[in-house]
Amino acid sequence: MTDDLIAKPKLEIRYKEGQARSALFLVAALSPLWAGWGLYVSSWLAVAVIRGGLTDYLDLFGLLCFYMFLIALGITTIFICLDNKLVLTQKGVELPRRFLLEMAGARKRGWGNLRSIEFKNEDLTMRFDFGVARFKSSGMSTSDLKDLVVAVRSNSPDTNCVFDKRAVALGIPGIQSAPQDESFTALWERDLASRFGSTAFVPLEAKAKLQEGRLTVIGQVSFGGLSAIYLCKDNLGETVIVKEAVVPLNADSASKAKALEMFSREAKILKELNHANVARVMDHFVENDRHYLVLEHINGLDLRAYVKEHGPQPERLIMRWAMEAADVLDYLHSHRPPIVHRDVTPDNLVLDRAGDIKLIDFGAANELLTTATGTLIGKQAYIAPEQFRGKATRQSDIYSLGCTLYYLAVGKDPEALSQSSLPDELAQKMPVLNRLIQDCTAMELKNRVASAADVAHNCRDYLTSIQHVH
């Protein structure tokens, strides 16, 4: 998102407020009185004052001023109610006009004036040096809420950010629980202990520095197991994603050495990739026995969050996304040496602002953890049977893609280690997609779609046939 702020003078976040819509409806409903009747009476009064003179018709002139004021008030109210944009720039925040009173008459505030941003009980509150702006979080889309938080983290790192459990559910980056929410704090601590209790891995805090200060952590995007993903800002002011991986302290020296070698090798290969729909790997480094990949920040919403917000998607759109994802996998699989992603899930496919699918979160860190710990990378419901046995192939990514297509159509994760098929009602509505999902998730490799190129070809044939029909 802040990449947009660098490339463009501003970023607009739409805010839909129930009160503003109600006021707009009321003003519109009364428009025959204040607009139609007001204009009629005003014109009649104006003619009378002009003909009789101002001295003899002061009372009519006063009535004329009243009706003119009524018309101006109605137009101003509409103007204010229609202003539903929260504008973010590199200099600060510009609030909608209806916040003029709360902000002491100045709705433009610099980032240095922002003291805190709080996400509690469905309300989003921004506290400035002079004034408080309160929004209903339901009035913004999830992606815009994320953009707002990223902008605050990037441009005003000293601002105190306090978010509740709903923010966690939405996947807002850089979250921290409210201090007074003891039950949630305890839950977070228990989760942290369960994830990291057996290791020495503790995720980095906001404002932590990497590479001798060249990278500053804005906040955590996610963490789990022995890895974490951070939103960071480099010394040029650009936003990047940093993926961190830790080899367990109890790993033997040979495993550590092999992991480090594989990390360096994989990172070098990934840096050579050049595809518009692949998150670019910009750098890799090792610091304090932690391994880092620096990746391009893709401004958008991952498909899991998109489905949570908008619900299951139609066949035509899913097939288009499948085609784009398959093209990316074909590019990776055709690389020399071939690159197997191993973690194709709705979480790792991002829909950018242009509506294109981008593949993220792949490569060295996954290979590193698999080598060092002997564990599998990827969510169980999306892992191919042969990948569970430690023998991932290019067709393993196809299996994961098929599971992802199932999620996009149903809105639920598929059953692990099984051939996926849409529920009967959906299968009848989406026969082509259902057949593709079945072919992609066949348990035996010989029965599965042979290549990502074949998946993309099937999707193109379907989309072409649809276009001819319409």
Image (cartoon, rainbow, N blue to C red):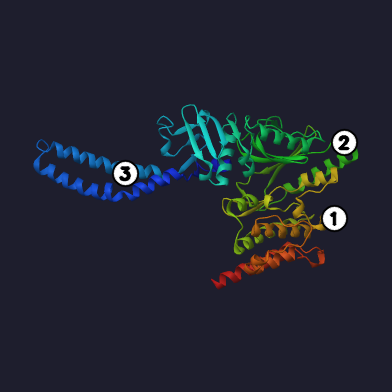
Residue 290 in sight from this viewpoint: no
Residue 334's label in the rendered image is none
Image: 458 above or below 135: below
Residue found at x 24% / y 46%: 38
Q: Mark 1–mark 2 contact, CB under 8 Å?
A: no
* In the image, farthest residue toward the front: 183
Question: Which residue is under mark 2?
Answer: 250
* Label 2 SS: loop
Residue found at x 66% / y 69%: 431
Q: Decide which of tag 3 and tag 2 comes sooner along the chain.
A: 3
Question: Which residue is under mark 1?
Answer: 391
Q: Mark 1–mark 3 contact, CB under 8 Å?
A: no
Indicate the quadrant where residue 262 lies: top right
* In the image, farthest residue toward the bottom: 469
* Label 1 SS: loop
Where's residue 353, x and y in %? 57, 50
**Marks 3 and 2, how far apart in space?**
72 Å
Q: Decide which of tag 1 and tag 2 comes sooner along the chain.
A: 2
As rendered, which of 449 and 417 lies closer to the eye? Answer: 417
How many residues crowd around disc 2 within 10 Å: few (fewer than 14), some, or many (20 or more)? few
> Please, what is the three-letter code of the amino acid marked with disc 1?
Lys
Question: Which residue is under mark 3?
Answer: 74
> Please, what is the three-letter code of the amino acid marked with disc 2?
Asn
As rendered, which of 328 and 71 lies closer to the eye? Answer: 71
Is 162 placed left or right of 393 in the picture? left
Q: What is the total number of numbered labels drawn onto the structure image?
A: 3
Where's residue 85, x and y in %? 46, 43
